[in-house]
């Protein structure tokens, strides 16, 4: 990638503008192909690898971290390794959430599966409003002091969750949350209302998951016609297509008009949004990864952005809350 590395929020950590997401590893992308993708990403300058303790559930929970643990030897210092805690990982009453018990146990288990001594970015996978922030930060601080965690991030938080978490960290003179990973793309722009403004106000990095809405913005209609649709023919993309088929068709025609692949266009739009640090992508092939790299290296023109904004308008009046809807 020709684009420079950027700082992750107010931390000193530098990450690539693309992160390799591993949610498809195990079940959709088998280990030999996963290793090829990882090697290709690293060789292309992508240093951010994002996973979670429950990924690989199609095989068994934790499988993806185990796969990464087999790949990491000899490459660990080149990788910014991000994983997550909070989702259910077992059948016991304390095998989910953000209790101090589960945070510490979850970190230890991830380290064993990843075969490493530290996690660069330890992300709370979902907010847990049943646990106080004092307890959460005590657990995170313990892991940081032990050298097992470098930075703490969040994922799928509301704007007010980010504010509460960071204010609690500030009271304890802690660094707090350095990044929020949220759902954000042309079709799903709710993050613009409060999540992105909160992240910007607290100088948190923004990592975007599902920048193509599960493949919906990656040329789904063409792929369905060709019989090549895989991910985009199921899950979030398939459900959204039932409602948004007409606008998706217009989008694909717009992409053809400007001579770029729909996946490149959708990803380039996300990367062009001011608060976004990096997009977490889930390619299944090196060719798809190369397309994402092209998107990062070729920004959209102002004219192209204007056309996309007309097709996929922001919520209400646009911008952050409450101005997006206030009279």
Image: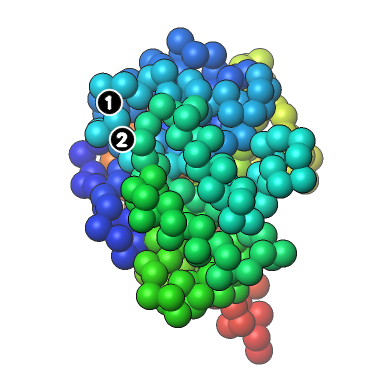
Residue at 56%, 75% in the rendered image: 164
* Front one among 17 and 101: 101
> Which mark is on residue 276?
none
Question: Do the CB atoms of the residues marked 1 and 2 lie less than 8 Å apart?
Answer: yes
- Residue 274 position by quadrant: bottom left
Q: Residue 316 occupies which quadrant of the picture?
A: bottom right
Describe the element under mark 2 as helix, strand or loop.
loop
Report which residue position mark 2 lands on: 79
Residue farthest along the top direction in this orientation: 32
- The quarter of the rendered structure image containing the C terminus is bottom right
Percent across and percent down for residue 59 are: 66, 19
Q: Position of residue 92 (x, y in %)?
A: 76, 39
Q: Secondary structure at mark 1?
A: loop
Residue at the spot x=38%, y=19% of the render?
71
The residue tagged 1 is: 75
> From the viewer's perspective, is residue 171 above or below residue 224?
below
């Amino acid at each position: 990638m020709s684009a420079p590395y950027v700082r992750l929020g107010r931390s000193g950590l530098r990450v690539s503008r693309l992160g390799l997401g591993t949610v498809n590893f195990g079940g959709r992308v088998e280990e030999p192909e996963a290793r090829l993708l990882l090697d290709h990403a690293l060789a292309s300058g992508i240093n951010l690898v994002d996973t979670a303790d429950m990924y690989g559930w199609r095989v068994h929970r934790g499988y993806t971290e185990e796969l990464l643990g087999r790949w990491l030897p000899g490459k660990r210092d080149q990788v910014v390794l991000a994983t997550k805690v909070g989702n259910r990982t077992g059948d016991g009453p304390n095998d989910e959430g953000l209790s101090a018990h589960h945070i510490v146990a979850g970190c230890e288990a991830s380290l064993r599966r990843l075969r490493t001594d530290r996690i660069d970015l330890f992300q709370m996978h979902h907010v847990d409003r049943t646990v106080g922030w004092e307890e959460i930060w005590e657990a995170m601080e313990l892991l940081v002091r032990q050298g097992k965690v470098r930075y703490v991030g969040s994922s799928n938080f509301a704007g007010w969750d980010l504010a509460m978490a960071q204010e609690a960290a500030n009271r304890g003179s802690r660094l707090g949350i350095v990044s929020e990973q949220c759902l954000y793309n042309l079709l799903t722009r709710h993050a613009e209302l409060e999540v992105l403004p909160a992240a910007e106000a607290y100088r948190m990095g923004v990592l975007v998951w599902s920048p193509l809405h599960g493949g919906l913005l990656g040329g789904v209609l063409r792929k369905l016609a060709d019989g090549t649709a895989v991910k985009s023919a199921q899950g979030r993309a398939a459900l959204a297509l039932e409602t948004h088929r007409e606008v998706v068709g217009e989008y694909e025609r717009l992409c053809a008009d400007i001579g770029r692949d729909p996946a490149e266009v959708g990803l380039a739009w996300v990367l062009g949004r001011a608060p976004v640090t990096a997009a977490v992508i889930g390619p299944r092939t090196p060719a798809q990864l190369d397309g994402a790299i092209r998107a990062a290296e070729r920004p959209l023109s102002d004219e192209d952005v204007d056309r996309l904004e007309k097709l996929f308008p922001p919520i209400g009046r646009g911008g952050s809350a409450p101005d997006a809807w206030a009279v």
